């Protein structure tokens, strides 16, 4: 659980709602279903037009990473790689076959299997780097969905504001309808700008940071497996890989 994300959401909402109350405003005045429907519906519709469905669905699943990020365990992974290296030196590369089958991380398992199959170091590097690049590309495309929503929602908020003002202009003869129309106009703008800067854009940035960490983790695994293939000393491998921890 990422406590910082939870605290960030609470602090942001508390600051805005608290500031509204300090100015003498009422929280109920910020709750406008019509404005919410316009902004959220328009934003989601625009992003669905921009991306493919599989990218959109992946972005929704990845959104949970903001609060429950995947665990990489780089230090533990280094120790496992050193153990693999010791096994390879004692039993040969075929001694890694059972370890490859038992390894839970599919990426590491694939690398170990390539070692067991006797693939050349450069061949292993090319195969694994392709998977690293493709995985990073797909995840980044999913993160950009939130970036796109952050770009669209303020504009959709302005559309909602204009719609509210049009409603006001059409009802100038009926003062009872002026208040709701003006409320929708201003609240739609708040929703559009607020959701972009408090949620969509920060989520996109955090997901990109997590993707970067994930890519570094996989690059570390690749470097470790290549070092084993080249027959490097386990102690040297450990020293080299510890550079990824900083």
Image: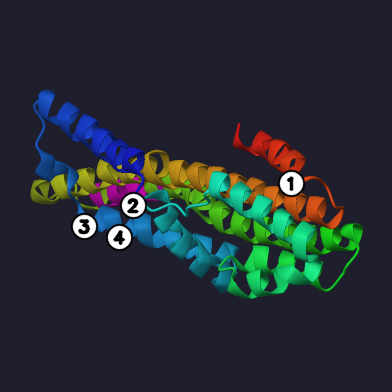
Q: Which residue is mark 3?
A: 33
Q: Which residue is mark 2?
A: 163
What x and y, as percent, mark residue 138?
A: 64, 61
Q: Quadrant of residue 183?
A: top left
Q: Are marks 4 and 3 in contact (CB under 8 Å)?
A: yes
Name the residue rendered at 74%, 64% in the picture.
111
Q: CA distance from mark 4 to mark 2?
A: 13 Å
Circle 3 — which element?
Answer: helix
107 and 194: which is toward the camera: 107
Q: Which residue is mark 1?
A: 234
Q: Residue furthest top?
A: 23
Residue 241 left/right relative to 191: right
Q: CA distance from mark 1 to mark 2?
A: 67 Å
Near mark 2 (Cα within 10 A), the count class, few <14, some 14-19 or many ≥20, is some
Q: CA distance from mark 3 to mark 1?
A: 62 Å
Q: Magenta stretch: residue 160 in it?
A: yes
Q: Quadrant of residue 101?
A: bottom right
Q: Which residues are magenta?
A: 159-168
């Amino acid at each position: 659980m990422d406590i910082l994300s939870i605290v960030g959401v609470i602090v942001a909402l508390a600051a805005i709602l608290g500031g509204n109350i300090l100015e003498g405003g009422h929280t109920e005045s910020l709750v406008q279903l019509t404005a919410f429907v316009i902004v959220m519906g328009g934003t989601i519709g625009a992003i669905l037009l921009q991306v493919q469905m599989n990218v959109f669905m992946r972005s929704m699943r990845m959104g949970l990473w903001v609060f429950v990020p995947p665990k990489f365990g780089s230090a533990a992974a280094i120790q496992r790689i050193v153990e693999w290296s010791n096994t390879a030196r004692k039993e040969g590369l075929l001694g890694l076959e059972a370890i490859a089958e038992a390894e839970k991380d599919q990426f590491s398992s694939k690398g170990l299997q390539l070692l067991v199959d006797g693939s050349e170091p450069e061949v292993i590097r090319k195969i694994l780097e392709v998977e690293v690049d493709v995985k990073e590309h797909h995840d980044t495309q999913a993160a950009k969905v939130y970036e796109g929503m952050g770009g669209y929602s303020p504009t959709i908020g302005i559309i909602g504001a204009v719609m509210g003002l049009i409603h006001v202009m059409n009802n100038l003869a009926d003062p009872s309808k002026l208040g709701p129309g003006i409320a929708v106009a201003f609240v739609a703008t708040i929703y559009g700008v607020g959701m972009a800067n408090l949620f969509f854009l920060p989520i996109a940035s955090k997901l990109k940071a997590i993707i970067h960490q994930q890519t570094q983790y996989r690059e570390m695994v690749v470097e470790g497996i290549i070092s084993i293939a080249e027959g490097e000393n386990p102690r040297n491998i450990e020293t080299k890989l510890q550079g990824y921890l900083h």
